[in-house]
Image (cartoon, grey):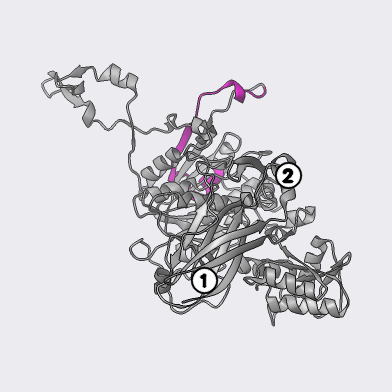
Amino acid sequence: MPKIDITRTELVWPGKYNEDGTRTEVAKVSLPFQVIETVNESRATREAKKEGVQEGLFEVYDGKEGDTFAKGWQNKLIWGDNLLVMGSLLEKFAGKIDLIYIDPPFATGADFSFTAEIGDQGLEIEKQQSLIEEKAYRDMWGGDRSSWFAMMSHRLSLIRELLSPVGTIYLHLDWYVGHHARPVLDEIFGEDNSLGEIVWAYGSPSGGRVSGAKLVKSHDVIFIYAREHGKHKYKVVYRPYSEKYIKDWFKFDDNDGRRYRKRWRRDERGVSDFEKQYLDESRGVPASTVWSDIQQAYADPRAYKAGVSSEITGFPTQKPEKLLQRILEISSEPGDLVADFFCGSGTTLAVAEKLGRRWIGCDLGRWAIHLTRKRLLGIENCKAFEVLNLGKYERQYWQGVTFGESKDKPLAERSLYEYLAFILKLYGAQPVPGMANLHGKRGKAMIHIGSVDAPVTIAEIDAAVDECAKLKQVELHVLGWEWEMGLYDLMVEAAKKKGVKLLLLQIPREVMEQQAADKGDVHFFELAYLEAEIKKLKKLGTQVFLKDFVIPNTDLIPDEVRGKVKKWSDYIDYWAVDWDFRNDTFMQGWVAYRTRKDRKLPLASDPHTYEQAGKYRILVKVIDIFGNDTTQAFDEEVK
């Protein structure tokens, strides 16, 4: 137990202090971001912002944009661990975010599965949380509540650094952990910077909520802290008068239909008289710390009607837009920068977009990022935004921390050997020494493992296939993090001609999570098969037609649902086309996706006309019902 000098009242938990009594520091890892997709921006606009072409699978975010929309700011949706993401944002955004709202998981044993829909008919499937989302949830709680304190204190410390001098944080919790969070917030932000707490009474208790010998839960709490009290932005917002209030107080009218109430005043002589307060000039009731006029998102009866438009996404912890609208109106102005590092289905970002705020959103869940992207696309005149991750840089960091680095070179032989052995063990394979391109064997299949910091290439697979053929091995499994465009069809057929059955499998991000790896919660999935046709049209025109799509992991779908799926296209939730891919960032030139209201999905893109003849690479991206994306590149000459 570390020796601690007790000089004040504070909350202490295991891991808060080092053995020597010093405070455990927050690890601040700064990694570059990869821009993996841009939405609602033309290629010409993108090229005008940068010089040359990025030679790589993704463009690296350089942070040189302006701090207003007019100066080139682009909103950002980031997929990854928010601790690493916030640490990486510090270099460019320390002291620059005006409002941060977070709604972290706050109940042990919660079920984070949610309902997704399949195909034209909207067949429902219960989507379980991914292994990595489950792992993140385990990390927050671990064996006891102390891990929640460690998780939140580290993130709140980074949030304080990211907040601007006029900034405010809203931390949304419930009764289970609210009282634990208050002393942590006081310690990090200072008691003097507390702006109080909001009690969100989200609905009337019903019989369905009765559970156990205790009162029915019907509220959450939202703690508010300023970065610097007195400098923080604050605007009074007003709620409309209730009908009863109007009836009780605005009793009079001027015989012209204008209702008013009497405001009695007494002058210096003590004579009383009244002033008229007209209803049509009154702003309403100032918002207090108890908000009982906003229902839960799922209290909307339209949420349960097929084909009816509503803000419902199917995400279990989705908050209503009215709640976030009020928060943003109180503590931010148009053009301010707003962030949500547990963005879920994207409510904060959607509201920020509609209110003219700039925004940054982050989530660990692949499906959350996909839902948010679709939700933003559904907003009329949505501004361009980027989808980013830490990609290979996070993997390089993980490899260095997990397997060690040599002083003379980052990928030492020992580090590389341990990395390969680790992946082979997770895949259930044994190492095979002495091979040039083959790293292990599982059953009858030889194994090749791709690098953490580069896509698996056609040449790389070709060399592994040749070595298999030379050794008279008939099956090869290639495990990779990222893949060179267009290799699926080419390599599977080429390997078959050489007598080798080729299987391409994705290394999941879960391998970087210690708890998931220790528990064996890691599954390698085959790459999906995508077939598309590029049709040449007159006058420099082209059009893309989807022809087939096969996902190998249909065993994740319940039998009763799988039996009702009639078409291969039912497994597609979204697809998009980049008409001029430059091997850097996917530029969404055309997109189609399913919504809860409109389940139909076109299998042909709109025609596209190029400005001039030439050779172009067309990239087609498909996202399936599980949030996994598959891409296929086509090199075409337009005349």
Type of amino acid under label 2: Gly
Q: What element carries label 2?
A: loop
Task: Please identify, in this view, whether the residue under mark 1 or under mark 2 is nearer the observer.
Answer: 1
Crowd tier of the residue under label 1, counting other residues whose Cα lies within 10 Å: few below 14, some 14–19, many 20 or above:
many
- Tell which residue pokes out farthest to the left in this image: 269
* Label 1, label 2: how far apart the Cα atoms are: 48 Å
Classify 195 as above or below 302.
Answer: below
In the shown orientation, is residue 107 left or right of residue 32? right
Q: Nearer the viewer, residue 253 or 301?
A: 301
In the shown orientation, is residue 147 left or right of residue 342? right
Q: Answer whether residue 113 is visible to the viewer in this image.
A: no
Q: Which residue is disc 2 drawn over?
A: 143
Q: Nearer the viewer, residue 622 or 65?
A: 622
Write down the quadrant of residue 510 in the picture: bottom right
Q: Does the magenta stretch include residue 9?
A: no
Name the residue rendered at 63%, 38% in the picture: 107
**Residue 58 percent location from the top left of the image:** 55, 70
Write down the quadrant of residue 485 in the picture: bottom right
Write down the quadrant of residue 472 in the picture: bottom right
Q: Which residue is disc 1 drawn over?
A: 581
Q: Is residue 202 magenta?
A: yes
